[in-house]
Image: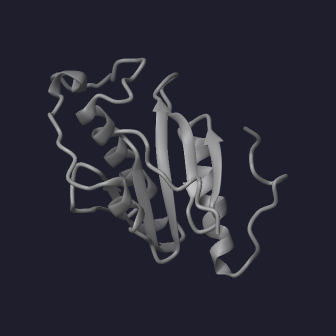
Amino acid sequence: MDRSQWYIGVPNGVVLCIDHIDRCRMDGRIYHAYSKEAAKVTNMSQFLFELEDFFDSICFPFPSVNERSFQDKEPKAKRREERVRVMSDEELLEKHGDLGTFIIRVQHRQNSSWQGRITWMDKNKTLYFRSVWEMIKLIGSALETVGGEDMPTEEEWPKE
């Protein structure tokens, strides 16, 4: 199998390993190069908040809009943590979920959303996404095929 799309390549690249899905519940793990420990996630909202906090902690990609809140608190951009890589890209790529494994590389945080690319490692398929919602839909459509159905055709996946 050609694995030319299996790379991290950016400081904020993450590997999402999904082990179990049941209606609105998704059990999985997120790995990034700055921690040997996985961040466990139990639903898509938690997954998105974990990633947003991670991006804010490394200030990459930098958001194009400021976060708004009802609470007075220090802007996230000012609480940057110096991070040291503790896991190589090769180690990250060895992580796999029981149902699906995705490499997520967010390139921009513009228009209050994310833009980037996602690689479904199990099928060696890479697509670009233009929003968080589109990324969620891509993950969902991939996981629907885990039940023994065929992978979606090119026409069923969004165009780049």
Say which residue appears at 39% left-offset and 51% top-offset: 14
Residue at far bottom of view: 148
Residue at far top of view: 65
Horizontal side of 140 relative to 152 (left or right) equals left
Say which residue appears at 25% left-offset and 56% top-offset: 87
Position above or below: 38 against 81: below
Residue 97 point in image, percent of width and height? 45, 72
Closer-to-camera residue (86/43): 86
Position above or below: 72 against 6: above
Closer-to-camera residue (79/60): 60
Residue 55 point in image, percent of width and height? 32, 36
Position above or below: 113 against 6: above
Horizontal side of 115 relative to 14 (left or right) equals right
Horizontal side of 4 relative to 98 (left or right) equals right
Residue 148 point in image, percent of width and height? 70, 81
Closer-to-camera residue (20/128): 128
Residue 146 point in image, percent of width and height? 63, 75
Position above or below: 74 against 96: above
Which coloring applies here?
Answer: one colour
User: How many discs appear?
Assistant: 0
- In the rendered image, which quarter is residue 13 located in? top left
Q: Which quarter shows the N terminus?
A: bottom right
Say which residue appears at 61% left-offset and 40% top-offset: 129
Say which residue appears at 36% left-offset and 24% top-offset: 62
Q: Which quarter shows the C terminus?
A: top right
Horizontal side of 26 relative to 39 (left or right) equals right
- In the rendered image, which quarter is residue 123 located in? bottom right
Residue at far right of view: 155
Closer-to-camera residue (86/77): 86
